[in-house]
Amino acid sequence: MADLGAVDQDLLDCMEQMIMADRKLRWSIVQRGYWVQGVNSFRDFLRAVEPYGLEGRAELIRCPTLITAAEEDPLSRLAQRLYYRLRCEKTMIRFTAAEGAGGHCEMANRSLLNRPVLDWLDVQFQG
């Protein structure tokens, strides 16, 4: 949608009910998201987060970019799409559940994540 803040109220109410019924979504959006964005309603939250999308912006990124993708992280499903849209120097590192790093932010095996990320940073800052 072009204007998330203008979503029909009935649809917003339905979405908010689904969010409130799901403990993880309630924490992620209402408890944490509202606080981070400094808002008090779902409509205001949508308005606040809309500018953070990469639609039409990913192609403008010029600095070297590292993308990590964990196999079982739902957010990683968008990583490949972002990677292809980037026109800058780019690197993608994938992590698997078998390695213990398949979840969000590779939290179950941060040491596996840290080495290649820090190595990548070393290369970037040496040049």
Image: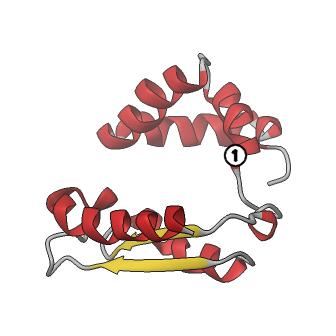
Q: Quadrant of the N terminus?
A: bottom right
Q: Quadrant of the C terminus?
A: bottom right
Q: Is residue 109 left or right of residue 18?
A: left
- Image vertical order of residue 7 relative to residue 110, above or below: above
Q: Quadrant of residue 100?
A: bottom left
Q: Position of residue 89 (x, y in %)?
A: 65, 78
Q: Position of residue 26 (x, y in %)?
A: 39, 34
Q: Is residue 104 left or right of residue 50?
A: left
Q: Is residue 97 left or right of residue 81?
A: left
Q: Residue at x 85, y 52 (%)?
A: 2
Instruction: Name the image colouring.
Output: secondary structure
Q: Nearer the viewer, residue 32 or 93?
A: 93
Q: Quadrant of residue 74?
A: bottom left
Q: Nearer the viewer, residue 111 or 34?
A: 111
Q: Nearer the viewer, residue 46 or 53?
A: 53
Q: Position of residue 8 (x, y in %)?
A: 78, 39
Number of marks drawn: 1
Crowd band around label 1 with a 10 angstrom C-alpha radius: few (<14), some (14–19), many (20+): few
For mark 1, give the secondary structure. Answer: helix
Q: Quadrant of residue 105?
A: bottom left
Q: Residue at x 76, y 43 (%)?
A: 51
Amino acid on which the number 1 mark rests in the picture: Tyr
- Image vertical order of residue 104 relative to residue 6, above or below: below
> Among all residues in the image, which is located at the extreme front?
126
Residue receiving disc 1? 52
